[in-house]
Image (tube, rainbow, N blue to C red):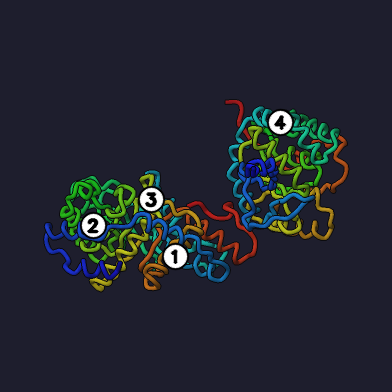
Amino acid sequence: MPKSPKAALKEPTRLSVRKTYKLYIGGSFPRSESGRTYLVDGDNVALASRKDARDAVVAARAAQPKWAAATAYNRGQVVYRIAEMVEARRAEFTALGVPADEVTAAIDRLVWYAGWSDKIAQVTGSANPVAGPYFNLSSPEPTGVIGVIAPPSLLGLVSVVAPAIVTGNTVVALAAGPQVAVTLAEVLATSDVPGGVVNILTGHAAETAPWLASHDDVNGLDLTAVDDAELATELERAAAGTLKRVRRPGSGDFTGDPGTAPMTAFLETKTVWHPKGF
Amino acid sequence: MTATATSRLSALPDSAVNLRAFLHGLPGVDKVGVEARAAALGTRSVKTTAKARAIDLAIRMVDLTTLEGADTPGKVRALSAKALRPDPADPTCPTVGAICVYPAMVPVAYEVLKGSGVHLASVATAFPSGQAPLDVKLADTRDAVAGGADEIDMVISRGAFLAGDYAKVFDEIVAVKEACGSAHLKVILETGELATYDNVRRASWLAMLAGADFIKTSTGKVPVAATLPVTLVMLEAVRDFRAQTGRQIGVKPAGGIRTTKDAIKYLVLINETVGDDWLSPDWFRFGASSLLNDLLMQRTKLTTGHYAGPDYFTLD
């Protein structure tokens, strides 16, 4: 008796669903406009082009006024929420090879900056004595859209993005460690961070950074992860064309106390004269 | 389609009864076809030198518009100055096609624009609704022309058109055209309120038969303004009208065109539908306010090599 054809079939093998790491622009995860991808440790990662950088700046600009107008308390809550969500996704980061204590340090860093949101104005602002019947008050204001060339580590990325956004700036980050950065983007997308406040591009910083540096609608540039002195100089020169604020602390150890400098680098001071005595 | 159109349109109407029969005898528009064609033409990639030329042409085609209740003489003067020199940093940047304002602001704009070659358009005839008696509309038109406007943007009575009273709409356009004198007449169909492409085609023919120099899509005051398919239908109408009568009519999409990418899609549409003859500010205009800044930013990107930002261009 012939065997039933059914019995000859093997148990179906399940095909694994592989993940493509995409960009994070304006709160969504598009592929690169150029259609390019590159391989990082066997994973397909979108390779951002200059037009992706342009789109990210448009998204960051659109999000900036509302984000800056949110109360400091609200911004602090949102950044704290990011810390909560990283905590919940610990396993995802460690699976990508991020050491457990680095995840912990990144969470602590987020909480630390969340706490600064409603205190930075009191530290950097002032009531100034003037020779006249006026109250003279200086208060910090966000710079606007910040281009960030971010370090590959989770702690490094958090240490450059969190201080910029907590004061009301929006960020376009060129991330060197794509899987970790995109996983952080997935955290941001579920943390009440409004779309466009943080935009993450994966790819080669040397290709996209010059477009951010010369972009008229970018107000500040953080060159933390630019180790190539020649490129850094070139970017600084391009940034000078539109008088961008440039921060270039050098990449290195992020585990120490960061201080307030990463926040104050992208703050401007507004001084108001208010008549008194009426 | 052209062959059918020509044979079916052989008898142009000479009475109200004929007009109705004629408009309803126009071939229907294939909705799916026209939308697919417009979408396909919208995917063309125009880059580098072609893009630079497209941008300059688009700037020359802009009817720089401000139609707000809050318009002040100062704002209109500033806008008129911008029309003459859109990019103060670059003298090679062409002037725009025209300024478009309310009749009350025409004398203010005229003071700035006279003798410059930039046209001065004024909306009239109870813009944007068109719901006013005919003598009011005519007075509105005459005032604008007397103030110095050389182009009049009139609205048709959509109420009468949709009720099927084509003769009334026809007579109104004829009367306004007469009140315009030597000024060019643009007839706004307000396609967003006409509901179907067949109506857009009928309204286009109605306006052209009544003596319009331009047909314009929208006022910009209703949610649905200019779209590519609607403009395609209107371009086909002006093409067929010229084939039939020998008279060339201009087209002006207005409202909702905000980016250089959008503008270039329209230029591609003209080139592929009606050809070179319409690729000129004399025969095609964009009714827009924010489009100009995007064109200028893209132009700056091409001339300087880096991305431009809105902070460097005036809003009005």
Q: Name the residue tied to disc 4.
A: A85
Could you tell me the amino acid type at mark 2? Answer: Arg
Q: Name the residue tied to disc 2.
A: B142
> x%, y% of residue A237?
75, 59
Judge left or right: residue A274 versus residue B222: right
Residue at position x 58%, y 62% in the image: B300
Residue extending furthest toward the front = A1
Residue at position x 85%, y 37% in the image: A99
Q: Is tag 2's residue or tag 3's residue first in the polypeptide sequence?
A: 2
**Between B315 and B127, which is closer to the camera in this rendering?**
B127
Q: CA distance from mark 4 to mark 2?
A: 67 Å
Q: Tag 1's secondary structure?
A: helix
Q: CA distance from mark 1 to mark 2?
A: 33 Å
Q: Is tag 1's residue or tag 2's residue first in the polypeptide sequence?
A: 2
> Mark 2, chain letter?
B
The reply to whether residue B313 is in sight is yes
> Mark 1, chain letter?
B
Are the numbered discs 2 and 3 placed on the same chain, yes or no? Answer: yes
Q: Name the residue tied to disc 1.
A: B267
The reply to whether residue A221 is in sight is no
Question: In front: mark 1 or mark 4?
Answer: 4
Depicted B32 relative to depicted A143: above or below: below
> Mark 4, chain letter?
A
Are the numbered discs 1 and 3 placed on the same chain, yes or no? Answer: yes
Residue extending furthest toward the top = A278
Judge left or right: residue A57 versus residue B133: right
Could you tell me the amino acid type at mark 4? Answer: Met
Are the numbered discs 4 and 3 placed on the same chain, yes or no? Answer: no
Could you tell me the amino acid type at mark 1? Answer: Leu
Q: CA distance from mark 2 to mark 3?
A: 27 Å
**Quarter of the image where one finds residue B275:** bottom left
